[in-house]
Image (cartoon, grey):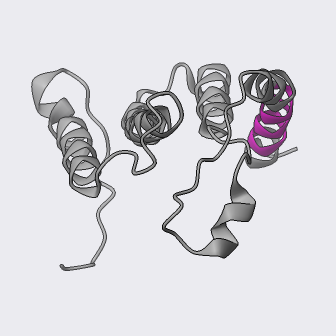
Amino acid sequence: MSLQVKIVLISFMISILSALIILPILKRLKVGQIERECGPRTHLVKQGTPTMGGIVIAITLIIATLILYSSNKEMLPLVLVTIGFGVVGFVDDFKKLILKDTEGLKPAYKIVRITYNINCICTLPNKTRFRYRNYSTNIKI
């Protein structure tokens, strides 16, 4: 069995197990989607849909990386960037659910946080002895 198939199978098993543990906890805590009254009527159907499922993805990513790539330092930037995006999503959901702010995190704050996260990861090799390959593309912006 190839390494890629093992990665997919291990990640799938971890995500199923963590979902079976976390989703009932989220339902018990009544962590559900809150829709604005001023929005489209069709969105009101989503009211109460469990949210914060990104926790399952973050747990799967961290555990699978620790199991499969604990000695491979090249995975560190990818994991840190993904966790940084997860933090933005968590703060957004937290504001919506706990603070009862239906707007959530303002788009400008999301962009600032994501830009800061990417900047920290891009400068990581210059501040430490950590080195990774240059995975550049020919895309020009």
Q: Quadrant of the C terminus?
A: bottom left
Residue, far left:
126
> Is 76 rendered above or below residue 4?
above
Residue, far front:
37
Residue 38: x and y in percent read 48, 67
Residue at 38 percent of width and 36 percent of height: 84
> Is 60 rendered above or below residue 102?
above
Residue at 58 percent of width and 26 percent of height: 62
Residue at 73 percent of width and 45 percent of height: 48
- Relative placement, left or right, of 69 versus 5 is left
- Relative placement, left or right, of 48 versus 114 is right
Residue at 52 percent of width and 69 percent of height: 39
Q: Magenta segment range?
A: 7-17
Of residues 134 and 31, which is closer to you in this image?
31
Residue 121: x and y in percent read 25, 37
Q: Quadrant of the N terminus?
A: top right
Name which quarter of the figure residue 41 lies in: bottom right
- Relative placement, left or right, of 54 versus 129 is right
| 35 in magenta | no
- Relative placement, left or right, of 100 versus 132 is right
Of residues 52 and 138, which is closer to you in this image?
52
Magenta residues: mostly which secondary structure? Answer: helix
Residue 94: x and y in percent read 47, 32
| 12 in magenta | yes
